[in-house]
Image (tube, rainbow, N blue to C red):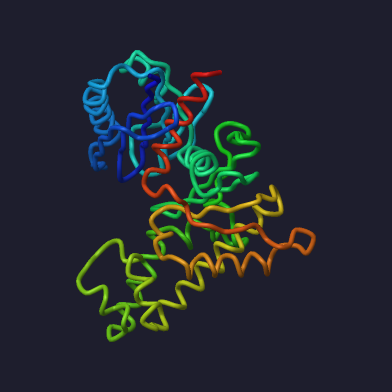
Amino acid sequence: MSHYLGIEIGGTKLQLVSGDADAKIVGRRRFGVERSKGAAGIQEQIEQGLRDLFSKGRPQAIGAGFGGPLDWRTGKIYRSHHIEGWSEFELGNWLQKQSGAPAFIDNDGNVAALAEATHGVAKGFNPVFYVTLGSGVGGGLVVDGKIYHGATPGEAEIGHVRLDRSGTTVESRCSGWAVDARIRSVKTAKPGSILAGLLGESVGGEAKYLATACEQGDVSAKKILNEIGDDLGFGLSHVVHLFHPQIIVLGGGLSAVGEPLKVAVQEVLERFVMEAFKPAPLVMFAQLGEDVVPVGALELARREKGN
C-alpha cells in the first residue's frame, strides 16, 4: 500500500501526518511552536514526529507546506516572517536525509490551495484561488489542477497586495493580529459594549468573539466585520482581474467568523469587479479546516513521486 508523509510548518503550529494514496490522513503528530527556540526547535520536533510516524513504515515520499517564501524546485527556504533561523535553509535536502525518502516543499498557501482544489470545497472548479486569514494573510492559485508557480521565490502573496499608495496592505488590515488589535481598541474605547463584555480579561485571539458579538447586535463588531469584508473584497478584486478564478476559498482562523464575512466579501467583489467579469467568482469557506495544509502536503508528495 502506498504511504506518504505530509508536514505543515507554520509560525504557531507544526503538524506531521501519514496518509494513503488518496491523501487520507491515517496518523498524526502535532506540536506547538516555541518561537524562542527558532528553526532549530522546530527541526527537533520534526525529527521526533518522523520517528513516531516511521512506525507505520518508511514513506514513499514527503510533502511539506512551509509558511514563507522558498524555492519549490529545490526546497530551499528564503525566509520565515515568524521564526528566526530558516533563512537559506535547505529544507528539502534536510528532510530527505532525515527520512531516506524524496521530499518536496512548497509554500503553505499553495499547498492549501491544492488541497481544497482536489479534496475540498473547490473540487471541480477551475481556476481556484485560496486565501488564508491567519496570523498573516497568504494565498495560492491552482490552474488546471496544478499549483501556479511564478518566478522564484513568490507567487500569490495576496497579503502583500497594497490597498493604497501609503503602504496599507491586505495583511495589515485583514490578518488575525490586525483584527485582534482593532477589537482591543474597542474594549478600551467602549468598555460597556457587548464585544468588550465577551472579551473579559482574555488577551490574544480576540477575533474569535467577533461573530458572537455581531449576532448579538454589537455596532462596533459589525463595523469591524464590514471593514474586513471591504478590504479583503477590494484586495481580491485585483486577483479576479488578473486571474479570473472560478472560485475563491477563504481559510484560516479568521474564517471562523462565518457566514457574515463570506457575504460581505462576496458583495464587495460584485461592486469592484469589472462588468465583463460579472458575476464575481463564488466565495466559499475552506472545507478541510486545520487539515488543509497536511492534506495538500500529502497530495503534493503523491503527485511529485509519480512524476
Q: Position of residue 148 (x, y in %)?
A: 61, 36
Please count the marks in the image. Answer: 0
- In which quadrant is the N terminus drawn? top left
Q: Position of residue 69 (x, y in %)?
A: 49, 36
Q: Is 52 rendered above or below residue 259? A: above
Q: Residue reaching furthest bottom?
A: 192
Q: Is residue 56 left or right of residue 300?
A: left
Q: Is residue 132 left or right of residue 196?
A: right
Q: Residue reaching furthest front?
A: 1
Q: Position of residue 290 (x, y in %)?
A: 36, 47
Q: Residue at x 53, y 53 (%)?
A: 249
Q: Position of residue 101 (x, y in %)?
A: 38, 15
Q: Residue at x 39, y 61 (%)?
A: 256
The one of 223 and 212 positioned closer to us in this rendering: 212
- In which quadrant is the C terminus drawn? top right
The one of 176 and 274 positioned closer to us in this rendering: 274
Q: Is 10 rendered above or below residue 6? A: below
Q: Residue at x 34, y 13 (%)?
A: 100
Q: Is residue 63 left or right of residue 26?
A: right
Q: Residue at x 22, y 74 (%)?
A: 200
Q: Is 203 rendered above or below residue 96? A: below
